[in-house]
Image (cartoon, rainbow, N blue to C red):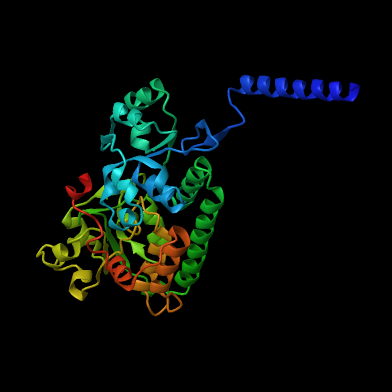
Amino acid sequence: MKNKIYVGILLAAVAVFCFLDAAHTGTSKKDIQVTDCYGRNVTVPANVKRIGCLYAFSGHVVAMLGRADDIVAVVRGLKRDKLLTGMYPSILNASVPGSNDSLNVEELLSVNPDIVFIKDTIAGSKAETGMLNKFGIKYIVVYYESIEGQMRAVSVIGRTIGREKEAEEYNRYYRKCIARVKIIAASIPENKKVRLYHSILETLKTDGPAGIAAEWTGLAGTCNVSAGGLSDKKQTEAFVNIEQVLLWNPQVIITHEDGAKEEIMGSAQWSSVDAVKTGKIYKMPNGISRWGHPGSVETPLALLWTVKTIYPDYAASIDIEKETRYFYKKFFNYNLSDKMLKEILSGKGMRKSKNEGRG
């Protein structure tokens, strides 16, 4: 009997200690600490159930890590991604609490998220973060300007939503792709490396020296003309004029947006550029997101595609169709049909119009 009493007293003491410890730290055993991309330590539920993705990249990552059906709030652009919404129709029913970099906190409160992922432009607004703090909406800032930063952002999202293992598997694949491409790039003679112009969305919008695209195009063995030719080394993206492009005279142009290739090819202003003369203008693939776009989860594939497209003689080991099928099966558990594979690699028609995205 005495032993039972002693055990009871001991258990009670342990319970009290745990309660006091939780009260002291302001957390419970059901909470975890996450350090976001701004270095903020945020206490979040250990079992996040309702997720807000107010940065498109975060929505792509949450889906990739297997939690798409738990997304309750998105930016409108996510509803325009045909492959994403085809895989996860529930995203079409998610709330859109605001537009661009402005939040509608009332709308966000109506879907009661456990956690919200936001981009740096929202995080930099005291008015927006003030409203989030006022109403007790927990948020994680997702931000990066480099490949390592992007992988860290995936890890942050993975920890927040209980998918750390899956996040690490993606990062491991990312690193393998980088290693493969580095080996290929090292085999290309310097006099064979091409001057590349990367058109982002608009034909005269391109990479800045500090952006992630400058990094991956460099890894792929190209001489990115804007990354190396702009004086402001802190720029991640930049608008340039046609005169500057003519001076750079790129040998290859890669584009993201539907119609950009046709616009360049049909323009008298661009006609003297080497890439136009030789027809070496390529539309990048588009799947869950635009491959290689600053907010793309498919940047590992963009690396492989770029080196294969520009240097086919040196990248014979890369089978881009096989890699594409593997990626979507591995990370989205999705078997691509031949038709969908062709559409992704063509990069055409994979984004709904802005009006379609209002569903």
Instruction: Report the residue at 57% width, 34% height from top.
Output: 32
Residue 259 at x, y percent in the picture: 17, 61
Considering depth in this image, is 135 or 47 the residue closer to the camera?
47
Res. 145 in view: no
Q: Quadrant of residue 307?
A: bottom left
Residue placed furthest toward the left: 268
Residue 300 percent across, percent down from the top left: 43, 61
Residue 209 in sight here: yes
Q: In which quarter of the image is the N terminus?
A: top right
Identify which residue, 284 or 157, lies in the foreground. Answer: 157
Residue 106 picture location, percent across and down:
30, 26
Question: Looking at the image, which residue is at 85% across and 24% down?
Answer: 4
Above or below, 232 against 292 in this view is: above
In this view of the protein, which residue sits in the foreground, 344 or 192? 344
Residue 40 location, x and y as percent?
50, 32
Eyeballing the image, is 43 above or below 314?
above
Q: Quadrant of residue 234?
A: top left
Q: Is residue 257 above or below residue 28?
A: below
Left or right: 110 in relation to 37: left
Question: In the image, 2: left or right of 11?
Answer: right
Outermost residue toward the front?
A: 1
Please give the name of the residue rendered at 62% of the width and 19% of the height, measured from the top-left corner: 23
The image quarter containing residue 219 is bottom left
Q: Quick one: 112 or 200, which is closer to the camera?
A: 112
Q: In this view, does 77 lie to the left or right of 41?
A: left
